Image: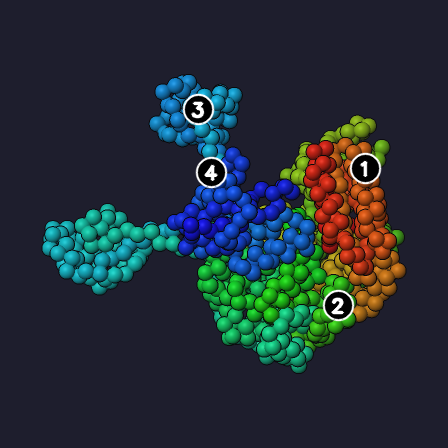
Amino acid sequence: MNLLIAEVIVDVSTYHVDRPFDYQVPAEWINVIEAGCRVKVPFGARNVLGFVIGLKKETDIPLHKLKPITQILDMEPVLTEEMLQLARWLKNHTICYEIDALQVMLPSALRAKYEKIIKLQAPQSLPEEVQAIFGKRQQANFKEFERAGLLPLLKQLVAQESVTIDNVVKQQGNVKEIRMVKITEDQHLIEKVIEQSSRAVKQRLLLQWMCQHLGEVLSPQQIYDETGVSSAVLEAVIAKGAAQFIREEVYRDPFTKEVSRTHSLQLTEEQLVALQAITAAMEQPKGQTFLLHGVTGSGKTEIYLQSIQKVLEEGKEAIMLVPEISLTPQMTERFRSRFGEMVAVMHSGLSVGEKYDEWRKVQQGKVKVVVGARSAIFAPFTNIGLIILDEEHESTYKQEDSPRYHARDVAIWRSGFYQCPVILGSATPALESYARAKKGVYTLLSLKHRALHQTLPTVFIADMREELRQGNRSMFSVSLIEAMRLRLEKKEQMVLFLNRRGYSSFVLCRDCGTVVQCPNCDISLTYHRTTEKLKCHYCGYEEHIPQTCPQCQSDHIRYFGTGTQKVEEEIYKLFPEARVLRMDVDTTRHKGAHEEILQTFGEGQADILLGTQMIAKGLDFPNITLVGVLSADTSLHLPDYRAAERTFQLLTQVSGRAGRHNKPGEVIIQTYTPEHYAIELAKTQDYEPFYEREMFLRRRSSYPPYYFVALVQISHEDVMMAAEYAGRVADWLRGNLSNQAAIIGPTTASIARLQNRYRYQCLIKYKIEPNLIPVLQRLLAMYRAEWIKQGILMTVDLDPSTI
């Protein structure tokens, strides 16, 4: 008997089924199926999606119990052997379900959508209201019964076997097709049709034109434009057999504008040394990680472009990651202008269909370079020659839900598989990355000067305490107002940075001190002027602005703190003639918004670009000569050991937007803590002294990179339950990990309640703890078997971006 068994991971995220299941491959599919294909398989009482991760000839399961695969969804595998190995690594490295690791590598269009379909078995015995739903059809959607309130009746009909319920697996994305006209290759046939159409003048004209275009495939619009005939004439000619309508597959185009081709620039001595080191690594196949540490404006992007050029010349492929969607348009434009149609783009701002088409271009080998955000690290290339992470220090490279991977770790794993280099680029590398470079784990490449030999911008620290003492209660210091006035007079552009969207950060009653809180989270509501509403930036709750205090009924309600909307309003009061573009989550909700705003600013149609952290890095406009940081303290006083590092990185990055071309730049940083070392050292863009100072504090406090940390978080709607189970977790960890691991907690999370769930956490600090992953896997098994039934939610993060 020619028996073939498929090992299938099913699309069910539960602990008990997180393993491969054996299914029999029907005889007609034995030569079709491959590892990496998606299939439909019976699982319990329904059909579910599954991934074939292996094929074998033998199984321990009795043959009469072996279920056959229901359907193969792919003729060609959607996951390569490398990606199946990567999924197994992700499963262990991030402690996630294997199905989650497999799904994260695919565009959402290829993930399953399940629909319940009701099928007729005995139409003659149906009640009238059910017959009305079916009409003349043999099947109907479950949702139709749900909307009509007929679920109890439906249950009875299923029991009587009058109808059956089927679970149908559907794909979310479809191939886009357009209608085209294929002209016949047979000239005699057209001449014969011309004879038959002697009286139809327009048809004869079209047929004579078709004689000059035998066998061509054209759109109907092209034919109308070139011949001047109507659709009725074309359809009449097609009816006579001179041509035919066909469906042709096309890719959706995510690019909204044309780009002109550019060529490689002359490199500086520093850039040349860095490029030579990278190209030398390409020639000796081995996985090697480079940390490209260059001041802002030092020409890191040109090194990326020329490195990729070398990769393409060798017939290989490259992945280029950027941390923010807002950076993707500018970076994609640069790459397309250098490499043309060889570039695909992948990020969450695309539609489902566009993501699917860009993924298919990569899979089918139509492109050689992918530019995108975090998920682009899973681009299905099969001959990677280089992977680049620009602004490698950014926390957006870390996925916050399962699987909790860091794009840097996946990049290094893939570079090991393909024996190719990884470039981590940044003006302000993560301390962990710089420490690894210092130890020789990574190869350090330094660019200490700007590419066009411009000086770094002049940085001035405005002490807002002194401004208050002088009677200035405005959000702008005197020096910033003067600098803005000067730039407007000179017709130069400026960037104003404030890492807080909305109008004001909280609403307070001046009589009793009540701050209006979100009812679901322990966080104050933010006032948004455009919608005249208070919003929670964590759970999305919103309400109308109270006219009186909800606590004491006083009408002394005031708005405190500053958001980007309020700053925009103040700018118009100070400078009515100024043209302001605001770039934050609220103004970039619609598709293509990032691109529109940056294009408008780049064309000089605005004087001021005001925004949150999405404008802090990567942007390169020649006319920006002033950068204003309205509050350097926003990120400095967060309860997080990385607060100083993040503040230094943000200030250095945003300062680097000024004076990047031939005009000198100036930066004004407003702060209430000017003496803090992160702010003092950001003034001189001096990374090394900051690194030494911060490393000293990290060593003293036993934090990364001297120690590793893992975070276990527990939440429940009942505060006592959350606290009790957090205590159990801490006790269990202390009893099962070695004395080398320090367990801190349980403590409340920095936001103690989120979406009506109380949150506690335990932090594990360790240098070497060989039992950590097995112990955490046992803890998760205990949670999944028992605690989850009590409504407890528990997450484990082996490399938390915040704690």
Query: In terms of secondary structure, where does tag 1 sit?
Result: helix
Q: CA distance from mark 3 to mark 4?
A: 19 Å
Q: Earlier in the sequence, mark 2 or mark 1?
A: 2
704 displayed left or right of 585? right
Q: Earlier in the sequence, mark 4 or mark 2?
A: 4
| Label 1 Cα neighbours within 10 Å, binned few <14 / some 14-19 / many ≥20 | many
Q: CA distance from mark 4 to mark 1?
A: 42 Å
Query: In terms of secondary structure, where does tag 2 sit?
Result: helix
Q: CA distance from mark 2 to mark 3?
A: 66 Å
Look at mark 3 in the image and give the residue it sits on.
161
Of all residues, the one furthest to the bottom in this rendering is 269
Q: CA distance from mark 3 to mark 1?
A: 49 Å
Look at mark 4 in the image and give the residue it sits on.
168
Look at mark 2 in the image and give the residue it sits on.
436
- Taking the spot 20% from the left edge, 54% from the top edge, the residue there is 242
Q: CA distance from mark 4 to mark 2?
A: 50 Å
Instruction: Please indicate, yes or no, whether residue 346 appears anywhere in the rendered image.
Output: yes
Label 4 sits on what residue type? Val
Q: Position of residue 459 (x, y in %)?
A: 77, 66
Query: In terms of secondary structure, where does tag 4 sit?
Result: strand
Q: Is residue 771 above or below residue 383?
A: above
Number of the front mark, 3 or 4: 3
Q: Is residue 663 above or below residue 153?
A: below
- Taking the spot 81% from the left edge, 36% from the top edge, the residue there is 724
Q: Position of residue 78 (x, y in %)?
A: 49, 55
Look at mark 1 in the image and give the residue it sits on.
723
Q: Position of residue 576 (x, y in %)?
A: 66, 52
Name the residue nearer the viewer: 568 or 139.
139
Instruction: Please indicate, yes or no, whether residue 262 appears anywhere in the rendered image.
Output: no
Whether the residues at callouts 2 and 1 have beta carbons within 8 Å, the answer is no
661 displayed left or right of 742? left
Q: Earlier in the sequence, mark 3 or mark 4?
A: 3
